[in-house]
Amino acid sequence: MGTPEHSTTGDTAGNGTGPVGGLGRACHLGPVVAVTSLAAALAVIAGRGTGGCVLVGAAVMTGQLSVGWCNDAFDARRDTAAGRHGKPVVDGAITVTQVWTAAYAALALCVPLSLFCGLWAGAVHLAAVGAGWVYNVLLKATRWSWAPYALAFAALPAFVALGLPGHPWPAWWVVGAGALLGIGAHLGDVLPDIRGDLATGVRGWPQRLGPDRARLLLPVPLVIASALLALGPAGPPGRREMVALTVVLLVAVTGTVLGRRWERLAFATAIVVAAVDVTLLLSGIGIGTGPP
């Protein structure tokens, strides 16, 4: 799912001395914690029992770890050539072989943990993890770099819902909002590093757009996701939904207008909009399921 392009200097796994610290820095701990927490919260809201919630969290965590380690291992040669200090392989804290070994070990754990959540649920989650690996090794530098993000984020609520009795699919607007959040996450993830990526030959979809167009486009999928989550459920939207949608629009417009001068502000407002979207999803508005 998330495979951030930023330097891992600021990761919270310590200073990264030795193999354990190096693996902690290489796994992209922030996205691992964020996506695992979101999946566990969705499982709680969906009514999974304690064991089911633990299984969902463990499956998502191992999948995220495998994608994060794969990202750093595959990029090690490019990062070394570009002198991207802050990356544990570049800094000599760990070897590429050790990172690949950790990635494959996490993936090996992810397979049974995912399938223990249910055959269909496990298949959907493994497809999402596979999308993360495909992004790392094939699509990151292509115009299709957004697609794995969209697939992986859309699959998260489906993974949780399909593990319920009767194996229901989540409502279409939940899946659509997840895909749009994934696209927004990709744009926001890459935006601060577009100029550096272009200098090292990485030409994914955001890099091809360029920093200015990527900044202007960033709030669009997030706002549409907000609209789906607020207006998608049956019946007229309530006050809470309308307040959330109003806040999203005001924040998005502010970020777009002022982001021309302060690029970090555009990124910060996108995070605020994404946080509102996640709140809508977790508040019970967006966990509705459709027919099996």
Image (spheres, rainbow, N blue to C red):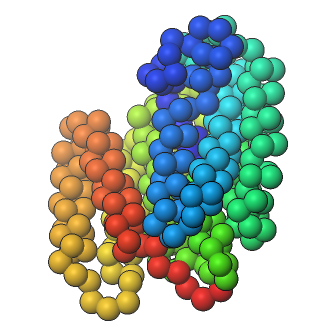
Residue lying farthest to the bottom in this orientation: 235
Q: Quadrant of residue 258?
A: top left
In the rendered image, the vertical position of residue 7 relative to residue 150, given as above or below: above
Percent x, y of residue 201: 62, 31
Residue placed most toward the observer, 104 or 221: 104
In the rendered image, the vertical position of residue 174 relative to residue 49, given as above or below: below
Q: In the shown orientation, is residue 202 left or right of residue 241? A: right
Q: Quadrant of residue 243?
A: bottom left
Percent x, y of residue 169: 61, 79
Percent x, y of residue 136: 69, 41
Query: Who's the residue at 36% across and 55% down the image?
Result: 274
**Is residue 115 among what the camera can see?**
yes
Q: Quadrant of the C terminus?
A: bottom right
Q: Quadrant of residue 108?
A: top right
Q: In the shown orientation, is residue 99 left or right of residue 87? A: right
Q: In the shown orientation, is residue 23 left or right of residue 175? A: right
Query: Who's the residue at 70% across and 67% down the image?
Result: 121
Query: Who's the residue at 76% across and 59% down the image?
Result: 116
